[in-house]
Image (cartoon, rainbow, N blue to C red):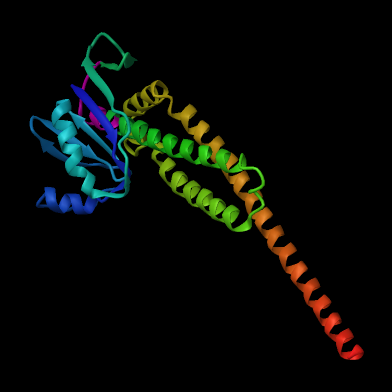
């Protein structure tokens, strides 16, 4: 069995997709995908932006992605493709090596867990890309000599940092374990094995470290803007006093 996964964008309107792809619209939890047959395979679409195909040829999968772009809420930006092949081998425990995952037996729970980890990995890659763009913008802004103290521009960038940080932290919730892993030790073992293989924890820590840095920069920019505004008001008050004194002197002299 071959899996192929890619992240389309920030979010996918699952309800709208279900209405157009299925005659039966049901409530599904945030972590659960909307599943439907596609050719000889199955497709799993997650609300947090990821699409996973099972036994769907690459050409057909790419064609499907173009159709699904219209259901993306926010910016459409495809990440690189992740692939994984599941091989059943009763003599081996759960092992993953060079994009091959060996399992002693295969069932719906194994498939669901594998699909979810792949969805997490490609969505985390989108988060990494978004964070990288944000950090580059911050570094470019800070390297502009003599412009850091300009309040309006500083405030605009600070607000963008905080907004992006909020969006990214919301997306990072994709790293939560699915409920199925709490119900079965086997599925939890699969999840842990694949999570280590795709380095989800390390990548998550790297993202949060960069986000913390961005938040610190935002705090400093807001403080600079606040001080600049306060200084401007102080000078305005001083100027008003000077004008008032000057007018009083003029009245006395003339």
> Looking at the image, is 197 positioned above or below residue 164?
above
Residue in the image at 58% along x and 45% along y: 215
> Looking at the image, is 77 positioned above or below residue 163?
above
Residue lying at the far top in this picture: please name it: 91
Q: Is residue 112 magenta?
A: yes
Residue in the image at 49% along x and 41% along y: 134
Residue lying at the far right in this picture: please name it: 253
Locate residue 177 relative to residue 36 in the image: left or right: right
Q: Is residue 133 magenta?
A: no
Residue in the image at 64% along x and 54% along y: 150
Percent x, y of residue 32: 28, 42
Percent x, y of residue 101: 28, 17
What is the span of residues highlighted in magenta in the rendered image? 104-113
Locate residue 74 relative to residue 157 in the image: left or right: left
Q: Which image quadrant is residue 128 in?
A: top left
Percent x, y of residue 200: 43, 29
């Amino acid at each position: 069995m071959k899996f192929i996964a890619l992240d389309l964008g920030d979010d996918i309107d699952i309800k709208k997709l279900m209405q157009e792809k299925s005659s039966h619209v049901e409530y599904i939890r945030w972590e659960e995908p909307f599943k439907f047959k596609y050719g000889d395979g199955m497709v799993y679409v997650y609300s947090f932006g990821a699409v996973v195909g099972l036994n769907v040829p690459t050409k057909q999968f790419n064609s499907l992605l173009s159709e699904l772009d219209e259901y993306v809420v926010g910016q459409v930006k495809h990440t690189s493709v992740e692939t994984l092949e599941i091989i059943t081998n009763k003599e081996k425990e759960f092992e993953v090596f060079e994009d091959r995952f060996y399992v002693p037996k295969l069932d719906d729970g194994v498939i669901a867990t594998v699909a979810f980890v792949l969805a997490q990995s490609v969505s985390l890659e989108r988060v990494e890309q978004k964070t990288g763009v944000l950090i580059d913008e911050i570094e470019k802004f800070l390297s502009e000599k003599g412009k850091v103290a300009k309040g309006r521009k500083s405030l605009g960038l600070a607000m963008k940092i905080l907004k992006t940080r909020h969006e990214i932290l919301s997306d990072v919730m994709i790293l939560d374990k699915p409920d199925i892993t709490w119900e079965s030790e086997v599925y939890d073992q699969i999840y842990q094995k694949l999570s280590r293989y795709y380095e989800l924890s390390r990548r998550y820590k790297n993202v949060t470290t960069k986000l913390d840095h961005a938040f610190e920069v935002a705090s400093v920019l807001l403080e600079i803007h606040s001080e600049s505004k306060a200084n401007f008001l102080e000078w305005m008050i001083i100027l008003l006093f000077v004008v008032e004194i000057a007018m009083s002197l003029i009245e006395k002299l003339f």
